[in-house]
Amino acid sequence: MTFLLLQTEDYLLPCLNKQMFGIDCLGCGIQRSLVLIGKGEFVEAFKMYPAIYTLILLALVILINFKLKFKNRKRIIITLAIINLLIIVISYFIKMNHLIN
């Protein structure tokens, strides 16, 4: 399994924003974070992309929603989406602040 994950890193998509403008985008690190989760490096995955676990949770809730229609599903999905957006934006500004200083 580790061999497959090591090869996966060779095929990650490059960030066009970083290539064109030289700065990270809001999604930079998500692919590498998923690879780290696959390797079992959960803390490193969080450090790479802090919103990874809440994004996985949101994706699971959305997928479950297709099969099971549960009460307050819209409110739960919207709340998780807002939490994810906040985590992504705040962690991006923290990362960019560390790069500048």
Image (cartoon, helix red, strand yellow):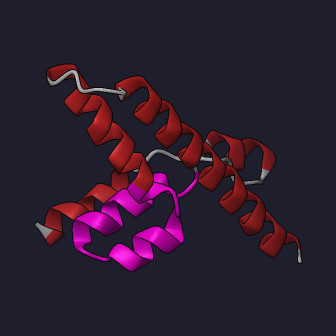
Quadrant occupied by the C terminus:
bottom right
Residue ID at (72%, 67%): 95
Does the magenta run of residues contain 43?
yes
| Residue 70 placement: quadrant | top left
Expressed as whole percent of the image width and height from the top left, the position of residue 3 reads: 15, 68
Q: Does the magenta-highlighted stretch encompass residue 77? A: no
**Which segment did they paint magenta?**
28-53
* Residue 14, image x, y percentages: 53, 47
Is 62 drawn above or below residue 36 in the view shown? Answer: above
- Who's the residue at 69% across and 47% down the image? 19
**80 up-or-down from 5: above or below:** above
Which residue lies most toward the left here? Answer: 1
Front in this rendered view, residue 48 or 67? 67
Residue drawn at (54%, 47%) of the image: 84
Report the quarter where the N terminus lies.
Answer: bottom left
Of 92 and 7, nearer the camera is 92
Give coordinates of residue 38: x percent, y percent: 24, 64
